[in-house]
Amino acid sequence: MQAAAAGQFRDGLDALLRLLRDHPGYREGVARAALLKVFDCLPKGDPLASEYRRKMFNYLY
């Protein structure tokens, strides 16, 4: 979250995806919730958000 808050969205999203992949139930799904918050911070239609939403859903399902 710190990386994303600093505007380094790709680094932040990568870290959150690793957490989601390796520990999906960590702190009751905090990685999933954080990913959704970062997506909300990106402009609507941002290709980075689309790319990482697909990755997130692949890890979840």
Image (spheres, helix red, strand yellow):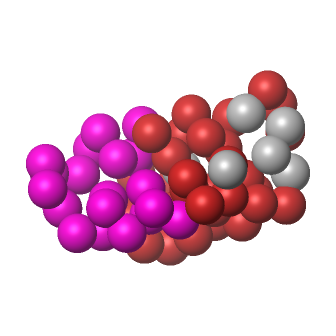
Range of magenta residues: 37-55
Asked if residue 48 is among those painted magenta in the image, a careful observer would answer yes
Which residue is located at x 61 percent, y 40 percent? 32
Asked if residue 9 is among those painted magenta in the image, a careful observer would answer no
Which residue is located at x 43 percent, y 72 percent? 10
Which residue is located at x 45 percent, y 62 percent? 54
Closer-to-camera residue (6/24): 24
Looking at the picture, how far across and down is residue 20, in whole percent? 72, 53
28 relative to 14, above or below: above
The reply to whether residue 8 is in sight is no
Looking at the picture, how far across and down is residue 41, in whole percent? 27, 44
Closer-to-camera residue (55/33): 55
Looking at the picture, how far across and down is residue 2, in whole percent? 52, 54
25 relative to 5, above or below: above
The reply to whether residue 37 is in sight is yes
Looking at the picture, how far across and down is residue 15, in whole percent? 64, 65
Closer-to-camera residue (1/19): 19
